[in-house]
Image (tube, coloured by chain):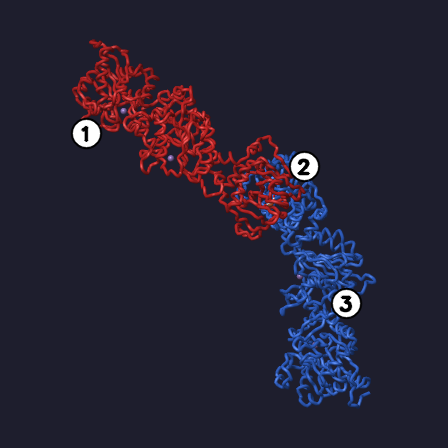
Chain colours: A red, B blue
Amino acid sequence: CASDSDDQTETPDVVVVTVGTEDTHGLQRFERSARINGVHVEVLGKGTAWRGGDMKRPGGGHKVNLLRDWIDQAYDSLDSDTLVIFTDSYDVVLLGGADELRERFLALRHRIIFAAEPFCWPDAGLAARYPPPDTSTPSPYLNSGGFIGRLEDLRRLIRAADIDDNADDQLHYTRLYLDPKVRADLDIVLDHNATIFQTLNGALSDVKLHSSEDGWAWLENIVSGTRPLILHGNGPAKLELNALSNYLPRVRTPDRCHICEELKTPLKDEPRVLLAVFIEQPTPFLDEFLQSILDIDYPKDKLELLVRNNVEYHETTVDAWFSRVSGKYASGKRLRPADQLPEHTARMIVLERATAGASSYVFSVDSVARVTPNTLRSLLESGVDVVAPFLARPGEAWSNFWGALSPDGYYVRAHDYMDIVNGKLRGLWSVPFINNCYLLKVDLFRQPRLKEVTFKVEGRDPDMVFCESLRERGVFMYVNNEEAYGHLINPEWFDPRHTNPDIYEIIHNRQEWEDRYISPEYWQSLEKTYEPSMPCPDVYWFPVVTPRFCKEWIEVMEAYGKWSDGSNKDTRLEGGYEAVPTRDIHMKQVGLETQWLRFLKDYIRPLQEKTFLGYYHDPPVSLMNFVVRYRPDEQPSLRPHHDSSTYTINLALNTVGEDYTGGGCRFIRYNCSVQDTKRGWILMHPGRLTHYHEGLKVISGTRYIMISFIDP
Amino acid sequence: CASDSDDQTETPDVVVVTVGTEDTHGLQRFERSARINGVHVEVLGKGTAWRGGDMKRPGGGHKVNLLRDWIDQAYDSLDSDTLVIFTDSYDVVLLGGADELRERFLALRHRIIFAAEPFCWPDAGLAARYPPPDTSTPSPYLNSGGFIGRLEDLRRLIRAADIDDNADDQLHYTRLYLDPKVRADLDIVLDHNATIFQTLNGALSDVKLHSSEDGWAWLENIVSGTRPLILHGNGPAKLELNALSNYLPRVRTPDRCHICEELKTPLKDEPRVLLAVFIEQPTPFLDEFLQSILDIDYPKDKLELLVRNNVEYHETTVDAWFSRVSGKYASGKRLRPADQLPEHTARMIVLERATAGASSYVFSVDSVARVTPNTLRSLLESGVDVVAPFLARPGEAWSNFWGALSPDGYYVRAHDYMDIVNGKLRGLWSVPFINNCYLLKVDLFRQPRLKEVTFKVEGRDPDMVFCESLRERGVFMYVNNEEAYGHLINPEWFDPRHTNPDIYEIIHNRQEWEDRYISPEYWQSLEKTYEPSMPCPDVYWFPVVTPRFCKEWIEVMEAYGKWSDGSNKDTRLEGGYEAVPTRDIHMKQVGLETQWLRFLKDYIRPLQEKTFLGYYHDPPVSLMNFVVRYRPDEQPSLRPHHDSSTYTINLALNTVGEDYTGGGCRFIRYNCSVQDTKRGWILMHPGRLTHYHEGLKVISGTRYIMISFIDP
Ligand SMILES: O=C(O)CCC(=O)C(=O)O
Ligand SMILES: O=C(O)CCC(=O)C(=O)O
Ligand SMILES: [Fe+2]
Ligand SMILES: [Fe+2]
Ligand SMILES: [Mn+2]
Ligand SMILES: [Mn+2]
Ligand SMILES: [Mn+2]
Ligand SMILES: [Mn+2]
């Protein structure tokens, strides 16, 4: 019943009222913020069709009318001095509870308090009619996204004038406020100091995120020194609200992602997933990529495989792989280079197959993404509809998400971007852009408002178009870095014109390179207590590269084929003269010089430093890096000599007894030979003074070794 | 009796007639040449006072008159058709025998034949009155130093006109020849083609010395293709005659010095010798010089010692030495710096003491000469009056004689100079200049014509003045290189301002340096089969320098005294920074850098090449050469490090256990230390990679080492 009394209670009930015709991610976030703060929320219009226009333009009268209807009802059931707070919902979060709201309201000692903002919108002409504010303020104008007053006062406010559903609510309330009689009657003021309401548009530099002692974040308005209770990402400030709502309210503490725990829903049964694989560009280490797809820890009969390859160079590989594995999956479909589909079409085909099909999720993986087997499961359990596993190029800032956007929609580094990339902050992050690998909940895309989601704007990147399309529809995208889900490889330098182009990738895709080419035994040699084998005095023997390395390396040389003629004249050298010539190919000739120097720095130098104590030379310098070919009918041996090196490495590329007989390296001063060389193992020996040596005669077959004269 | 017959015999007797009023070296040479060729010589005027003027100016009528007297006598005792050859003697040698002379004479088919020469002398105006010669000839004019004819014809010639003793003989005969009647009557011709007579003045390029198959030399006149039989060093060509008479006639074959054997006279008893020692300039290795004087293999009671020292710097040494040894000699006399005598005076004092005294010889030795003990004896036996042992700066062309003179009396390289210096030709050589060490027969200087021999012409070198003075008096000087008599040291770079200046002399006086400073044990290390000691792997140990080296080297450093402060800042280095600093003095600071580099090249490099097979780097490069001083209270040790070298040498300069305790060098990778280092021995070890090492702590005393980082 309505109260007649003037003595309003000092502890009125508090009701938060909002409008949410659709159950968007924004509304869910708002409701959570209310729940977290123990505030009761009335969501008006749920299930009703929205008639208030879209949020970019003036509109929203529908909100006013929904509120009027609620007040009419509430006035019967609630105390008339109940404190009612009206706010938007999709772009608002609550930062405080009922007690705080009441307290602040009472302390302000006015009957109706509206949020304030820096812009006089939508009718800038009205600015002149504002009364001069008490203090100079950065937010002189009324914002209608939040106001507070007792039920009876709001009732009078709402009855003071009518509004069409599609008229603008802010214009409506502004006019009322600017009517001196209404303003005085109802004692309406604006919350210039953000005592309760913080609007973000135009006010980003007024606010600062703090961490309190208990680890929760809180927001200060640093202009007025207040701690606002209701945060409104009005107008274009929605992305900033998204960013702040990665922390507020009570989303995470520095070492714990509370929201992750709230959202996490363990898989009961395994939903069907459309596994979409995209190969859009020549990609190093595609073998390993395809294997990583196969390694996804999920029942293959719950996976519908769709492989889109748009790279002719990879087609043979992809074809072989698909033929081999597709049968294991619930279904298999391919889009081949020959189909000549643009990327956006291919991606749309996937989305359409999903919404039309039986899968509950799409797991989309580009060939540059390298995910761990557990990734899919983790994402499925994460409880959000659109989520990417965090992936980055190892050691680089480049990742598969953006933390912020420039006004024209490109990457901008967010304040917490590097902390997320480095894993200093972990969890689930609402971000404006993700790509390369993500999970989509298919149901989301069945909603009418997402029907027109697209990948296609001519001349723009399909991923950027897609994400923008989602942002416009109020879809929240997340990146998850709770766990390590893998990384991105770097396809930029990959050149398929090379023979075995992956072997050129040591610099830009070190991890893949290492996994494929560095011998698993290599790592033992770096252990503190490991005693390397020493077949001759101060000649050390280490396993370094894999058989595959050796095979591919030889193939590169033989494909190039221009072996030197073994004469002393050598135009590849500075002096044009080689005193003890081999038949060889220099790394410079096959474009592998820089790569090989990186190999020396990253894999050989650590061995050297362990072996030859106290010698440091980083990076190692080596001007002479070459593969030698010994053959009985060509050059079978090499006469005694020193190398122009501080130390030399001599890598056996093939196998004595299998590929050739004879051969080896003899250290003359020690009368000691290494003949049982092992493929993939290096000999490391001093070059200049003590280790006078010769290449022993190859009797049959062909012997290949890779030599570097290090620190000449 | 005189013959009346016209049919002259076809094999007349041959008589050579010459004038030799004094028994000069030239006359002796002439007589030998006659003897060698089996020719009978009549020497006229022996013992008679010469009245013919001196030989530089016109004169010589006395010769004509002596010949006239002889002919008058001979006409009674010899056949009138006896073939008479008249020649000069002091500047003539015979190159052929009686048969050849007769044959050539008969073949020429004229009655009187005069030598010819290029100059119309002494009256050039007479040239116009010469009959045109048969052929164009470089020697159109009469020379009176040689003519040939039958006794009766020469009698007619000599009677055709009178001449005063002091008138000019050549003018006299020229006038007769130019008188057409006399010329026709006596059938006088000139030997334009040098069929018999070769005059040398102005004709040096007409002759060439050849070696015949039996090894003897012979002279060709290359203009006319003849082989002259009588060689006349007329006028200023005396020096060239001296040079040719080192070969002609039958003086030597390429491998045997016949003249040496002819002259050699074994010592029967040991004549008394005035041993004159001259120290005219600061001289390196004077200790060794004084010892070499003492070492002369000769009874000291037959030696009168005269020591002239003109160098204040050496006086202490000389004084001590003289006091110690002079008593052993027959007599001892000194000329000291305090006497302030110029060199020429000192040298003249010696000569005067000799001629006035009881010694038969003067043996003069300058401090730059280093003679073997046998030198004096060999020279005494050599059979010539003025003779120098051949001495040269090792490896240089600089020696103690000159083979030829420029017109102004300075050194010119003779055609055989280098062969003599190199010992390709050996024996006794008549030369125009000797110095530094020579033997003089005192009797020679008692002869009247040598009374005015002198060392003094103001502003000229006393040695040059002396030799010129001898040449003018017809004294032949010899250099003897039959045996090795020693060498010259090079005083030019010696700088007594240094501490121990001799140790700076490795470059310019290598042999002395080596004898004093290189350990006798060093040489064993170079032997093929020598196995060097290896106290740690690839660390080699060699004895290299003597204790005296070590002592002097330390003295040089301590006298300099500016030890570095042991901090990382080191302005002596290019980068200004030393990572592992020692307290040290660099060789550059004490002016020993170049010397040390030579030491490395000459003594260390050969060890390295034997030790580290196949490594060649000549010369070794070393930028860091320094003496380190370790002391408990200063810098006692050196932390683990590598050297910036291909190999390092570490030379112990003093003795562990005596001079200090502790110290030594530890090679960390091999866990191997060398603590019992030996003074004068080096450690040689690889610098950069394998031989991480440290300098162990000196517990007491001072340890000095010399370090070089070779081939950085
Ligand atoms: O044949 C070998 O193992 C030695 C090769 C070698 O010493 C070189 O290439 O410098
Ligand atoms: O004390 C020693 O023997 C070592 C000296 C040394 O290693 C150096 O000076 O580099
Ligand atoms: Fe080699
Ligand atoms: Fe060292
Ligand atoms: Mn809003
Ligand atoms: Mn893309
Ligand atoms: Mn003469
Ligand atoms: Mn002199």
**Mark 2 nearby-residue class (10 Å; few <14, some 14–19, many ≥20):** some
Q: Is residue B389 left or right of residue B666?
A: right
Amino acid type for the residue under numbered disc 2 = Gln
Above or below, comparing residue A322 to residue A8 in the picture: below
Picture disc at residue B391:
none
Rendering quarter of residue A43: top left
Instruction: Residue under label 2, please give it.
Output: B675
Amino acid type for the residue under numbered disc 3 = His
- The local secondary structure at tag 2 comes to loop
Residue A478 visible to an observer of this rendering: no
Which quadrant would the C terminus of chain A be assigned to in this image?
Answer: top right
- The local secondary structure at tag 3 comes to helix
Quote the CA–CA distance across marks 1 and 3: 136 Å
Is label 1 or label 3 in front? 1
Instruction: Residue under label 3, please give it.
Output: B258
Identify the mark nearer the N-term, 2 or 3: 3
- The local secondary structure at tag 1 comes to helix
Picture disc at residue A125:
1
Above or below, comparing residue B95 to residue A614 in the picture: below
Taking the image in four quarters, ligand 1 sits in the one at top right
**Mark 1 nearby-residue class (10 Å; few <14, some 14–19, many ≥20):** few
Is label 1 or label 2 in front? 1
Q: Relative to the observer, which residue lies in front, A347 or A413?
A: A347
Above or below, comparing residue B134 to residue B264 in the picture: below
Residue A578 visible to an observer of this rendering: yes
- Residue at the spot x=27%, y=11% of the render? A10
Q: Relative to the observer, which residue lies in front, A331 or A64?
A: A331
Please provide percent x and percent y for residue A625.
Answer: 54, 44
Q: Relative to the observer, which residue lies in front, A348 or B618?
A: A348
Rendering quarter of residue A49: top left
Rendering quarter of residue A202: top left
User: Which residue in the rendered view is the most extreme toward the left?
Assistant: A181
